[in-house]
Every structure is written in C-alpha cells, then in structure tokens.
Amino acid sequence: MSSSTAGYAVYALIAAVAIVWAAITYLLRPRFATVDDAVTRLVRHRVARWIVWALWAFVGWHLFVRGSGAFK
C-alpha cells in the first residue's frame, strides 16, 4: 500500500466516523451532542477558531494541492 493510498484511507475513515456520529446524534438527539453543537461550542473561543482554521488549511493543502501534482 502506498503512502497516498494510506492517507486517503485515513481521511475516508475520518469522514465515515463523522457521518456515523452525525446519524447517531440525529437519532438520539437528547442524549448526545450533535456535530453542529460540538463545532459551535469549539469555535466560541478565539484560539480554538485559529486551530480549526489551521487544521482546515493543512488538510486542504495536503489533499488538493499536493495531491493534484501542481508542483511537479
């Protein structure tokens, strides 16, 4: 397995976990926080907003720019 295949597998796993979490919390709303609730609570703080932005930029760079072959 190449490193790019492993990377895509990890991101697919993260996406699958997020989708399952969203479905379970939608069905069991009173017991668990939804994805929206968790993100809203997280980005209330200035430092957390910067961390979320940095992670978003990092993932975007590695998935789309490096993966596209633009710099070869």
Image (spheres, rainbow, N blue to C red):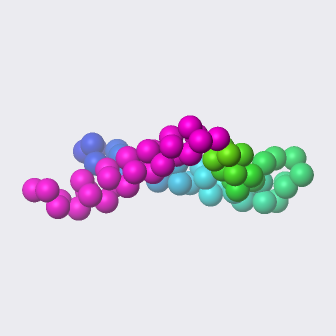
Q: Going 56% across and 54% down the picture, which residue do you hit?
A: 16
Q: Position of residue 52 (x, y in %)?
A: 52, 45
Q: Which residues are magenta?
A: 45-72
Total of numbered circles in the picture? Answer: 0
Image quadrant for the C terminus?
bottom left
For the point 66% across and 50% down, the residue is: 39
Q: Between residues 8 and 36, which one lies in front from this camera angle?
A: 36
- Using the image, determine if residue 4 lies above or below residue 67: above
Residue at the top extreme, as displayed: 47
Image coordinates of residue 35 in percent, x first then y, are 69, 53
Residue farthest toward the left in the current orientation of the protein: 72
50 is within the stretch colored magenta? yes
Was residue 31 drawn as part of the magenta stretch in this picture? no
Where does residue 18 sit, x and y in percent of width and height? 61, 52
Seen at 70% across and 56% down, the residue is 36
Q: Nearer the viewer, residue 54 or 38?
A: 54
**Which residue corresponds to the image point at 87% horizontal and 47% vertical from the top-left?**
31
Does residue 6 appear left or right of residue 33 in this picture?
A: left
Q: Main secondary structure of the magenta part?
A: helix
Is residue 46 found left or right of 50 in the rendered image? right
Q: Horizontal and vertical percent for residue 49? A: 56, 45
